[in-house]
Amino acid sequence: MADYELPPLPYDYDALEPHISEQVLTWHHDTHHQGYVNGWNSAEETLAENREEGDYSSTASAIGNVTHNGSGHILHDLFWQSMSPEGGDEPTGDLADRIEEDFGSYEAWKGEFEAAASAAAGGWALLVYDSFSNRLRTVTVDKHDQGALWGSHPILALDVWEHSYYYDYGPARGDFVDAFFEVVDWEEPSSRYDEAVQLFE
Ligand code: MN
């Protein structure tokens, strides 16, 4: 049953140069993201073994590992799909209209998102669809799961862990956030928004 797999990057490792280096994408995808996939599989194995043996002594920590590593896998997958070498534009269509409706304007949303990205201790800035309030919202998550809002469907993900930018930008995280907007690709976030609206509205 432990069979989560690391999907290949949806573009070449050097495709986001000069904004994100080939070296960082290689380490980030092949080592860090792979580690979350492995950690999730391993925690699932522990949970299954414990249920079978009726020994729950390591179950609580395995549940925590599922949340941490599972969220890490899900968010990295979304992060890769939130960028492309053809990116750098503003959203269009229904998602653009909704951003304007819920945040006032694209620029107002972008300012809020950049503030979230600069504040995360080591984690994520996310644009989410909040299915309780039926609105788009900015969420800041520490690690992969601390500070998440229940019922949120992530639409766009920016990884601001140090492994995501330090080799390229050192402590200048804001320069990395600017670089993200040079390669942000709204195609996948737009379809995720459409899915969320179909599910929840
Ligand atoms: Mn990462």
Image: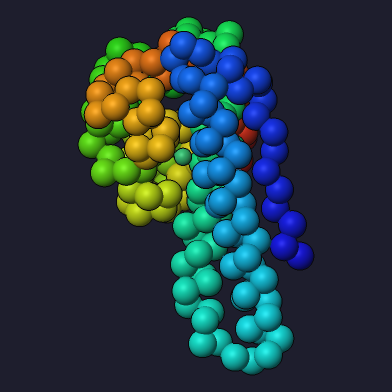
Give the camera-side residue of 136 and 74: 74
Name which residue lies at 61% across and 23% down: 13
Q: Quadrant of the N terminus?
A: bottom right
Q: Position of residue 108 (x, y in %)?
A: 27, 17
Residue 36 or 79: which is nearer the viewer?
A: 36
Q: How is the image coloured?
A: rainbow
Question: Where does residue 183 sit, x and y in percent of width and height?
Answer: 49, 14
Q: In this view of the protein, which residue sits in the foreground, 136 or 124?
A: 124
| Up/down of 162 relative to 70, above or below | above
* Left or right for 100, reference 12: left
Please state the horizontal and vertical placement of residue 69, each as a whole percent of the image: 52, 55
Q: Residue at x 42, y 33 (%)?
A: 164
Please state, as top left, top right, bottom left or bottom right, where the C terminus lies in the image.
top right
In the image: residue 191, left or right of residue 4:
left
Q: Is residue 60 left or right of residue 171?
A: right
Q: Is residue 84 visible?
A: no
Residue visible at 23% across and 36% down in the picture: 119
- The image quadrant of residue 55 is bottom right
Tell me what residue is drawn at x 65 percent, y 61 percent: 41
Instruction: Indicate whether 104 appears above or below 2.
Output: above
